[in-house]
Image (cartoon, rainbow, N blue to C red):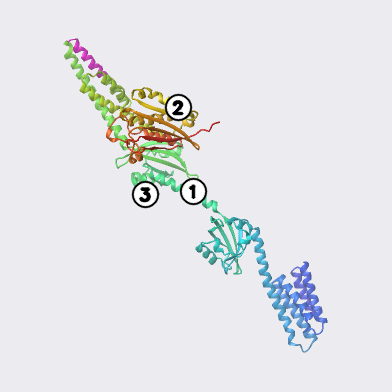
Amino acid sequence: MASRMVESLLRFLQEGGLRKPQNILVAGAFGAAILAALLVEPPGTNLILWSLLFIPAVAVGHLYREKGVVAATVLGLAYLGITAGRAYPPNPDIVLPFVAMVALAALTSIVSYSTREQIHYRKAMERAPGGAFLLRREDGTIVDANHDFAELLGYTRRELENLPISKIWPYADDRERFLSQAQPGTGNVVLETQFIGRDGKIRWFVLWGRCLEDVIITCRVSDVTRYREEETALKAERHRLFTILDTLPAYVTLQGEDHTIRFANRAFRETFGDPGGGRCYEVQRGSRRPCNPCKGAMIFTLKSPEQWEWDHTNGKTYGVYAYPFTDTDGKPLMLQLGIDITQRVQAEEALKGFAGNLQAKNQELEVLRSQLSLVNQELDMTVRERTADVEKLLAQKDEFISQLGHDLKTPLTPLVALMPRIIEQEQDPDLRRLLEIAGHSVTYMKDLVQKTLHLARMNSLYIELEIEPLDLKAELDNTLRNYTILFKTKAITLNNNIPGGTVVHADRVLLGEVFNNLIANAVKSLEDKKGAITIDAIRDQKSIVVSVRDTGIGMTREQLDRAFAEFYKADASRHDLDSPGLGLTICRRIVERHGGRIWAESAGAGMGTAVIFTLEAVDAP
């Protein structure tokens, strides 16, 4: 019987890998225990035999876990068989070593397994990419952490041992949700949350956790702080872009090839309603079919910008600028910018009607001139001279009307050219005074149109500046040559304090226009055209700060706040027609296009005004 048990034990161990050194030692310990049970006296109560039995029981429990318990049971049964065969009737005490062997094997199996698992997870934690740590479920303290995790939070590994997780993870909701989900047998738990480092900075982690035997949670983290910060920055930029688009007075849309409106700003929604993914012809025109021909389709075909106008049923006319656009997924879209041009179109129509009326009047005057020529044939030389003067004026008027008819886009240019000559020829003082008022009005209108067009050009995103290094003092001297006679006749003192060698990056023509406008404004603000204008420039880090100061009428706080608004005049009571109120607005556009800024300062009414702007400095070679 003992022989069969020994054979079974050897076969069991051999199945587990008897050729391994530890298995050979275990088999030897089993053999020694069986041999001792056959030889020692008394076998049932001998302490030496018990120790020989317990050692292999502990060994197989450590090495084989459940199989080790079976092996210890087989060894114990062999011991009981041998002891019962040698001492009959058997002593009940011989059962105690058998029970102890099985218990020791089971206990060793449990303890060694738990220990090996912890060692395994500790090694895995050390080898894990990124941060990793072990968390005790019972009290929420850190058992151990690898170097990467400690370094991420600015701690050492020793400082993290037995540290409450709430110290570095104070967000109770995330923490409780993670601990509640990390249960035995539930697999991995993944959570994106925030930890706080030693320096108080918040770091975003993706946390993976898995529970081990309801005691330890093994955790691994990936630092996603940079991605979250970039995501936050992108959201802020997106919000800023949408805010800018919503503040535009023109409507902006993005449309697909199927005519669906993918995006619409606030101006579009307020005018046509929320598109809700509808098609442009449904939302804007209330039609069930696309326009024929569809001008927007040309954008997708030609892949080039297009421009057109269309009339809405509400009586308004819109000028549309369309550009090809590519979506984030690579699909083609069309970007549309629509501007309400109703007033401009109405003005053009009015001008056309005015030109037609003038042409009709001209024909009537031609008839009257023929009749007048027949009536005055017998008048004397004086009358003929006056008639010749009248005919000359009529010819001038005809030339003016012809020019106006051929160039509707610039209808005021011939008026500006003809009015001085008409005034020169007129002898009646009252009529001459009225013509001078009209001439001032025409000049004002022409200046208004030119400056308005120039302002519109400066507002364009596509104008290219010819930036080059310019000597600021030399450019100012060129501008001041135009004011030499004015300064002498009006008793104006000019102080050019710009140091020589002050070089800036600027467009030569536009820089001259800024100086021209600022000096002209300063001259207008001087009472009785007497006073002083001082121009300075200083270096401020990478910029040159230029100031144009005068000793004129000054400005109040309200006037300073509105100084650069379009068509604003600080002294509205003067009603002069010398300036349309666009000079400072144009200066602001030019300076901003150069990457600088411009502002005005004044100590109050009668204390003079200073207009200050910045330009990029050029470092000396």
Tag 2–tag 1 contact (CB < 8 Å): no
Q: CA distance from mark 3 to mark 2?
A: 52 Å
The quarter of the displayed image where residue 480 is located: top left
Q: Secondary structure at mark 1?
A: helix
Position of residue 460 relative to residue 107, above or below, is: above
The x, y position of residue 490, in whole percent, is 33, 25
Q: CA distance from mark 2 to mark 1?
A: 43 Å
Type of residue at label 1?
Answer: Leu
Mark 1 sits on what residue? 234
Mark 2 or mark 1: name the one nearer the start of the chain: 1
Tag 3–tag 2 contact (CB < 8 Å): no
Mark 2 sits on what residue? 475
The x, y position of residue 562, in whole percent, is 34, 39
Does residue 558 appear anywhere in the picture? yes
Q: Is residue 249 left or right of residue 238?
A: left
Q: Nearer the viewer, residue 391 or 590?
A: 590
Q: CA distance from mark 1 to mark 3?
A: 25 Å
Q: Secondary structure at mark 2?
A: helix
Q: Residues within 10 Å of mark 1 (few under 14, many from 20)?
A: few
Q: Residues within 10 Å of mark 2 (few under 14, many from 20)?
A: some
Type of residue at label 3?
Answer: Asp
Type of residue at label 2?
Answer: Glu
The quarter of the displayed image where residue 443 is located: top left
Q: Residues within 10 Å of mark 3 (few under 14, many from 20)?
A: some
Bounds of the magenta span? Answer: 380-395
Task: Kindly report which numbered mark, 2 or 1, lies closer to the viewer in this rendering.
Answer: 2
Mark 3 sits on what residue? 274
Question: Predominant secondary structure in magenta?
Answer: helix
Specify the label residue 490 is tagged with.
none
Mark 3 or mark 2: name the one nearer the start of the chain: 3
Position of residue 233 relative to residue 398, above or below, is: below
